[in-house]
Image (cartoon, rainbow, N blue to C red):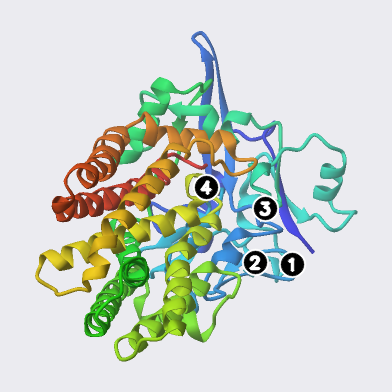
């Protein structure tokens, strides 16, 4: 079976009965929605037309939320319904970013992800979903798309149906008849001057969408929608930064020693010990930040007890465990095997987040090809900068290492700058238009001043100038590079969530 809906917008009157019935049937908290009606308006007065769009989970054939969930809390049932196991969810919020349709929310009271489950408790008793029963015009038609005799299957075979975001390649199982494309394509609308019956977006999202309204090519405006907020905040931005330091400091120390002259064994051993210790500290901070960002932190061990090996959150957790083992071993002994272990596992510790972000099908800016390499370069910047500051603080590092740090930092900063300049060309296939809108927020929009002024000018160009003209000011360059890196990673996380995806 593959249960799904056909929604006939030639019948829909925008009455919100489906929203109310869903809330009542499933005890959906105030401020959250499993199904909702979006209003858009197009044209110029007096020739203006309003369109309604009933939006919800698409019960995808290839559901990205199931793939990214680290603890198998999300699963696709035999009847095709995608549902959440409340006894397994850890509230990591990754599924909310994986959904291209903005259909998953976190219940703030329980800390559990929730979404439309097709009223499965009613389906099991032979009843239709509450939204379909209450619709006064019978615009919501449920059924099994794999049953050729079902009404939804026949409607689909007749052609003329539309789905949301086919470019996301999730295999959506909600099809539309006669829907206004602006209602199901966020990039075709901008914010209205005034919302009706609802609170318009505020904060960063309002600023980003106002910029789009002034500079985009939209032909319609949104006049009613449900509230949304940025789900990942400063903890995730800081996690990227601390992880860069943890992943980079020991491999950079080994690389700098290899590039330098013959080291004094005692100095080399002490440098290895200090670098491994610093990496462990920042890796610990990284773990604490991730746990603190969970809505159900007491369930964090579920990642290891019931892992979903398709999720890069799980793969990354085990990569970090392996890297931690290498770091602990480096506290006591040095060998070529541990050195290569630091290179490989340190690189993967930096890079795995790119693949996790790649599973976030709802946040196209994060899906950028080449992000893994960029994260490794950022780890090189962080590692070299921290080692330079340690020497300034009086930690007696290997003298051969110190001579190589400026070269490593210069190369990594150059690579960082090149990756930033190529961001507009590194586009996820099939999502070009959506990516361009998000990237424009960084390059020309509300984040541009911080991006170019702090992240690039102060965080890259000024350190490069210092390294070229005054090597003794290496600590200053290191501080600027670390600060610029933190700003860039924070902007990347925030800009990726700034524009509506539903």
Q: Nearer the viewer, mark 2 or mark 3?
A: 3
Which mark sits nearer the N-terminus, 3 or 1?
Answer: 1
Please tell me which of labels 3 and 4 falls first in the chain. 3
Left or right: 98 as drawn, with respect to 414: right
| Residue hosting label 2 | 120
Residue 38 in view:
no
Percent from the top left, x then y, of residue 212?
Answer: 42, 27
| Residue 368 disc label | 4
Q: Quadrant of residue 376?
A: bottom left
Q: Which one is nearer the viewer's eye here, 130 or 295?
A: 295
Residue position for label 3: 170
- Mark 3 or 4, which is nearer the eye? 4
Where does the N terminus fall, quadrant-wise? bottom right
Q: Position of residue 427 (x, y in %)?
A: 56, 41
Q: Give the image location of residue 300, x and y in percent.
A: 40, 79
Q: Which residue is mark 1?
A: 79
Instruction: Describe the element under mark 1 as helix, strand or loop.
Output: loop
Between disc 2 and disc 4, whose residue precedes? 2
The residue furthest front is 262
Q: Is residue 159 left or right of residue 28?
A: right
Seen as rendered, the residue at the extreme top is 46
SS at circle 3? loop
Q: Secondary structure at mark 2?
A: helix
Q: Is residue 60 visible?
A: yes
Marks 1 and 2: CB-CB under 8 Å?
yes
């Amino acid at each position: 079976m593959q249960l799904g809906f056909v929604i006939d917008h030639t019948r829909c009157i925008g009455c919100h009965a489906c929203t109310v019935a869903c809330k009542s049937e499933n005890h959906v908290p105030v401020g959250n929605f499993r199904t909702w009606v979006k209003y858009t308006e197009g044209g110029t007065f007096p020739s203006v037309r309003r369109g309604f769009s009933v939006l919800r989970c698409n019960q995808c054939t290839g559901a990205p939320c199931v793939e990214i969930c680290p603890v198998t809390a999300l699963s696709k049932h035999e009847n095709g319904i995608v549902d959440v196991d409340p006894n397994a969810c850890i509230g990591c919020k990754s599924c909310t970013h994986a959904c291209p349709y903005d259909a998953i929310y976190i219940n703030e009271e329980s800390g559990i992800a929730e979404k439309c489950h097709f009223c499965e408790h009613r389906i099991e008793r032979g009843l239709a979903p509450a939204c379909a029963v209450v619709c006064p015009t019978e615009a919501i038609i449920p059924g099994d798309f794999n049953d050729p005799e079902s009404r939804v299957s026949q409607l689909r075979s007749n052609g003329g149906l539309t789905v949301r975001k086919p470019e996301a390649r999730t295999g959506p199982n909600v099809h539309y008849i006669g829907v206004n494309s602006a209602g199901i394509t966020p990039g075709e609308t901008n914010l209205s001057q005034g919302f009706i019956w609802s609170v318009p977006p505020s904060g960063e999202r309002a600023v980003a969408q106002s910029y789009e309204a002034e500079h985009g090519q939209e032909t319609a405006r949104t006049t009613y929608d449900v509230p949304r907020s940025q789900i990942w905040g400063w903890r995730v931005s800081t996690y990227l930064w601390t992880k860069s330091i943890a992943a980079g400091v020991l491999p950079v120390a080994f690389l700098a020693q290899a590039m330098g002259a013959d080291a004094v064994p005692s100095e080399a051993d002490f440098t290895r010990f200090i670098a491994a210790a610093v990496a462990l500290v920042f890796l610990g901070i990284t773990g604490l930040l991730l746990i603190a960002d969970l809505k159900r932190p007491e369930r964090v061990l579920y990642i290891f007890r019931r892992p979903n090996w398709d999720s890069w959150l799980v793969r990354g957790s085990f990569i970090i465990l392996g890297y931690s083992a290498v770091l602990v071993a480096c506290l006591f002994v040095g060998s070529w095997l541990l050195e290569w272990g630091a290179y490989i596992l340190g690189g993967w510790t930096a890079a795995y987040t790119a693949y996790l972000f790649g599973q976030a099908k709802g946040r196209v800016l994060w899906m950028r090809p080449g992000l893994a390499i960029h994260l490794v370069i950022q780890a090189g910047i962080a590692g070299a900068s921290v080692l330079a500051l340690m020497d300034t603080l009086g930690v007696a590092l290997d003298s051969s290492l110190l001579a190589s740090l400026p070269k490593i930092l210069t190369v990594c900063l150059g690579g960082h700058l090149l990756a930033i300049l190529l961001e507009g060309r590194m586009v996820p296939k099939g999502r070009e238009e959506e990516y361009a809108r998000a990237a424009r927020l960084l390059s020309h929009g509300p984040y541009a001043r911080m991006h170019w002024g702090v992240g690039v000018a102060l965080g890259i160009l000024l350190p490069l100038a210092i390294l070229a003209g005054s090597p003794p000011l290496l600590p200053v360059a290191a501080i600027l590079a670390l600060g610029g890196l933190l700003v860039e990673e924070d902007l990347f996380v925030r800009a990726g969530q700034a524009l509506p995806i539903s």
